[in-house]
Amino acid sequence: MQACPDKHLIPAPTGGVGATCQSCAHCPWMRQNSLSLILETLENYQGHEIEVDERVREKALISIQRLLDFSAALKEHGSVENMVRAGVRI
């Protein structure tokens, strides 16, 4: 958040009015997920596909690419502060 002090970040998704949860970022059930469990699910549970509209996929791909670009820039510069100093825009 220090790299973007002008932005207000909200953990999402929120549960909405009347929900008993705050967000997935703070959920004890979501914390039980791990990369190895996700991989096992993807490898072993065939036939449980989710179809996504092409326009949604294209927009999601932009976000995923930005995350990958950010990760590469972070690896190259060592910290967000160094990225800011170098004028890296993601």
Image (cartoon, rainbow, N blue to C red):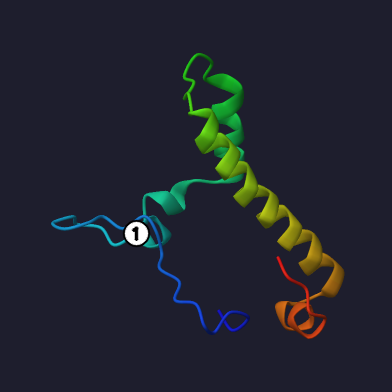
- Across and down, in percent, residue 87 comes to 78, 79
Within-10-Å neighbours for mark 1: few <14, some 14–19, many 20+: some
The type of residue carrying mark 1 is Ser
Q: Name which residue lies at 16% across and 58% down.
A: 17
Q: Is residue 6 above or below residue 10?
A: below
| Foreground residue among 76 and 86 | 86
Left or right: where 28 falls relative to 51: left
Q: Residue 65's spot in the image, x, y percent?
A: 69, 49
Q: Is residue 5 left or right of residue 25?
A: right
Work out whether 27 lies above or below 88. Answer: above
* Residue picked out by circle 1: 23
- 79 or 34: nearer the viewer: 79
Q: Where is 2 relative to 14, above or below?
A: below
Look at the numbered disc 1 and give the secondary structure of its residue.
loop
Residue lying farthest top?
47
Q: Residue furthest front?
A: 55
Question: Relative to 14, is 10 above or below?
Answer: below
User: Residue 31's spot in the image, x, y percent?
Assistant: 45, 54
Q: Name the residue located 59 percent from the left edge and 38 percent from the top edge.
A: 58
